[in-house]
Amino acid sequence: MIDDSLLLHLKEIGMSEYEAKVYVILSALRVASAREIHEQTKIPRGRIYETLTSLAQKGFIVSSGKSPVRYSPVDVFQMFEQLKRESVKSLEGLYQRLKALETETPEPLMQGYKLSTEWTRDNQIRMMLRRAKSEIILLCNDEEFITTYGSDISRAAKRVFVYLVVGRKELAEFAPIKCYVGGSDIEASLFHHEEGENIGLSMRLLLMADRRESLSILEDNGRLTGIFICPDIYASYLSRKVVQEIQPVDRSRRGA
């Protein structure tokens, strides 16, 4: 009886089902004719010669004699040393080709993704807060967002600089960390648009991480949509401007 696990290993190195069966039988018998192999493996007679020819071309077996032709396996050590060399050579070639693609294909300047569901927005916010390596800037004008992600913001603040900028000073009461308020540019451009600017969208949250990626949560007629951009070529400029303009909320006056 042929060991199924042995057949599986042989198929993993590129043999077909029939090739694996024939090779196992020949390894056990050491030498056999096509008829004997057919009787042992039950492989259809019409496929035996095809399989033997394929194994010979791949270097697994050799044939001798003419009436009848007999087949025997190549020395196992010799064969597997050759397989290892060919495998390493093949993997090295594949590696070089993939590296060439990596360097030849230019990275897109910016990639934007629309996050339409609450689940995708929630996961992206939490992931950004976790993976930031140096700085997080979070502009928020919504109590619900601050309380929902309070523990995530607090954990992030233990690792990196976190600037939590609120649209209204009273929101600082719900914040887990020190808060800031923006100057006139932030107020007019992000939180409350100036009169005559008929944009139709309101920003609920803007998260920028490491001055490289950004996530905006926008509201349009009661519907929320997230826009995630990475790499965001504007994030570095906007992050610097925000940090330059913001002022800390006076804790002694919170709630006053």
Image (tube, rainbow, N blue to C red):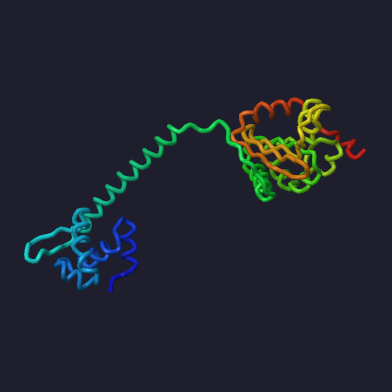
Give the mark count: 0
Q: Is residue 246 visible?
A: no
Task: Locate the C terminus by quadrant.
Answer: top right
Q: Residue at x 12, y 64 (%)?
A: 70
117 above or below 230?
A: below
Image coordinates for residue 62, horizontal then vertical, percent: 15, 58
Q: Residue at x 29, y 58 (%)?
A: 15
Quadrant assignment, res 249: top right
Image coordinates for residue 243, horizontal then vertical, percent: 73, 28
Front residue (pair 94, 199): 199
Task: Decide if residue 94 is on the left or right side of residue 115.
Answer: left
Image coordinates for residue 6, horizontal then vertical, percent: 31, 65
Q: Is residue 57 visible?
A: yes
178 above or below 79?
A: above
Q: Residue at x 32, y 60 (%)?
A: 11
Front residue (pair 246, 67): 67
Front residue (pair 253, 46): 46
Image coordinates for residue 1, horizontal then vertical, percent: 28, 74
224 above or below 51?
A: above
